[in-house]
Amino acid sequence: MTEQNLLATMQQQIESLETKTAFQDHIIEQLNNEIAVHQEQIRDLVEQLHLIGQRVKDMNSSPVGKVEDETPPPHY
């Protein structure tokens, strides 16, 4: 292999590596953006779940019992 062919082959390999690296950088950026969106959605869902849990606790600790648990009034 001549020196010229060797340089051409190495140049092609370098360009191929640069192309792969650019593609990987692009994919990594897309994945990072997607992860950021998912993290925000998870934060929102956790907050909503916490609020629902608080509402359930508030409903269970209500001084008013369930209608079916109440004794009927004396006139029945």
Image: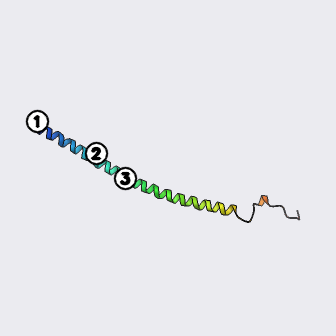
Task: Give the Cα separation between the discs numbered 3 and 2.
Answer: 15 Å
| In this view, the mark in front (1 or 2) | 1
x, y (%) of residue 47? 54, 61
Task: Give the Cα separation between the discs numbered 1 and 3.
Answer: 42 Å
| In this view, the mark in front (1 or 3) | 1
In the displayed structure, 51 sits above or below 3; it is below
Residue that badge 2 annotates: 20
Q: Which mark is residue 30?
A: 3
x, y (%) of residue 20? 28, 45
Dot placed on the residue nearer the N-terminal end, 1 or 2: 1
> Looking at numbered disc 2 in the image, what kind of residue is underneath it?
Lys
Task: Give the Cα separation between the discs numbered 1 and 2.
Answer: 27 Å
> Looking at numbered disc 3 in the image, what kind of residue is underneath it?
Gln
> Looking at numbered disc 1 in the image, what kind of residue is underneath it?
Thr
Q: Secondary structure at mark 1?
A: loop
Dot placed on the residue nearer the N-terminal end, 3 or 2: 2
Q: Which mark is residue 2?
A: 1
Q: Quadrant of the C terminus?
A: bottom right
x, y (%) of residue 73? 85, 64
x, y (%) of residue 64? 74, 65
Q: Secondary structure at mark 2?
A: helix
Q: Quadrant of the N terminus?
A: top left
38 relative position to 5: left or right? right
Residue at image x 70%, y 63%? 61
27 relative position to 47: left or right? left
Q: Place residue 53 in its image quadrant.
A: bottom right
Residue at image x 18%, y 41%? 10
